[in-house]
Image: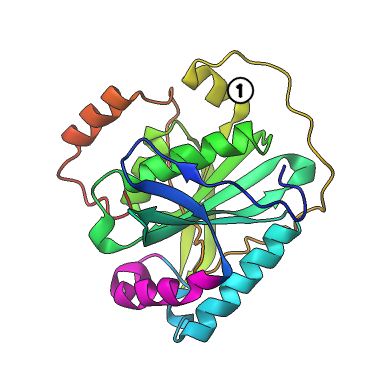
Amino acid sequence: MLRPNDVPRRLDTAIPGLQLVPLADGDAEELFALTAANRAHLQRWLPWVNDVRCVADSSMHVRNGLELRRLGLRLDYTIRLHGRVIGTIAYHVLQPANRLGMIGYWLAQDATGHGYMTTAVRHLVEYGFVDLALNRIELRVAVGNCASQKICTRLGFKEEGVLREAEWLHDHFVDLRVNALLRSEWERGTGRVPGQMPQMPQAENATNGRGENHTAPRRNTASHGGKIKSSAEHAEQRRKEKTSTDYTD
């Protein structure tokens, strides 16, 4: 797991110019500007958007995220395309005792439809199993968020059930679909040879709260299992789904 005071590494992806860069103190202004420009787009599924009204709000969330990272309980990244922030992704909950991580994310509207978020999630999952020694990774998505559900399906997450009226979204409750990928499933799906779990350093236990804010929202989607797809299979599936309303991918 992430040791207290560890500084995570940058994650490069197979898409030219697309990187996952660890959250930093200086990111607040850029994150606020991106949030403000995409407010209507993000409000559809994210309950925190209306609480972010100025740069100070973004600064507070950045500070909170960095403090939880210092404790080994959370790990935030900005998603950057040729250096420009286009969204965020995070393990917004890390439970060292259970080797569990929960992923959340969001993406600017003009960056959707290119496979960026699917790629970002794929790389964060790999980082979680290889570098953080996780055994289980969860994604929770509001029922009806078809775009995020497709991401989970592509990456082999299995749908485990629905938490009824589990989240307040502006003026009503929404159900949350629980999806998970186990280390053993990921190893089989990627063709890796199963082996012993890496030794995990001691770290403080995480709370049971979801711990989300605008630096790393929570939600993601339903899956019916299956192996993790190759690049060619992924491209063919994206071609077939071209008419979808996948605003997060």
- Residue 203 x %, y %: 82, 49
The residue under the point 73% across, 19% down is 196
Depicted 95 relative to depicted 87: above or below? above
| Residue 32 visible here | yes
Quadrant assignment, res 186: top right
Image-based side of 204 in relation to 87, left or right: right
Disc 1 secondary structure class: helix
Please tell me which residue is depicted at 55% across the width and 61% down the height of the picture.
23
- Please tell me whether residue 39 belongs to the stretch shown in magenta: yes
- Please tell me how many numbered marks the rendered image carries: 1
Looking at this view, is 84 or 138 the one in front?
Answer: 84
Q: Report whether 135 appears left or right of 84.
A: right
- The residue carrying pointer 1 sits among few (fewer than 14), some (14 to 19) or many (20 or more) residues within 10 Å by Cα, namely some
Residue 54 percent across, percent down from the top left: 45, 86
* Residue at the limit of the structure toward the left, as seen here: 243
Chief SS of the magenta region: helix
**Magenta run includes residue 58:** no
| Res 180 visible | no
Q: Mark 1 points at which residue?
A: 184
User: What colour scheme was applied to this rendering of the protein?
Assistant: rainbow
Q: Which amino acid does label 1 sit on?
A: Ser
Residue 130, located in which quarter of the rendered image? Answer: top right
Q: Residue at 72% across / 42% down in the picture?
A: 1
Q: What stretch is highlighted in magenta?
A: 26-45
Residue 88 placement (x, y as % from top left): 45, 59
Q: In this view, does 82 lie above or below 68?
A: above
Residue at the image position 36 percent from the left and 47 percent from the top: 18
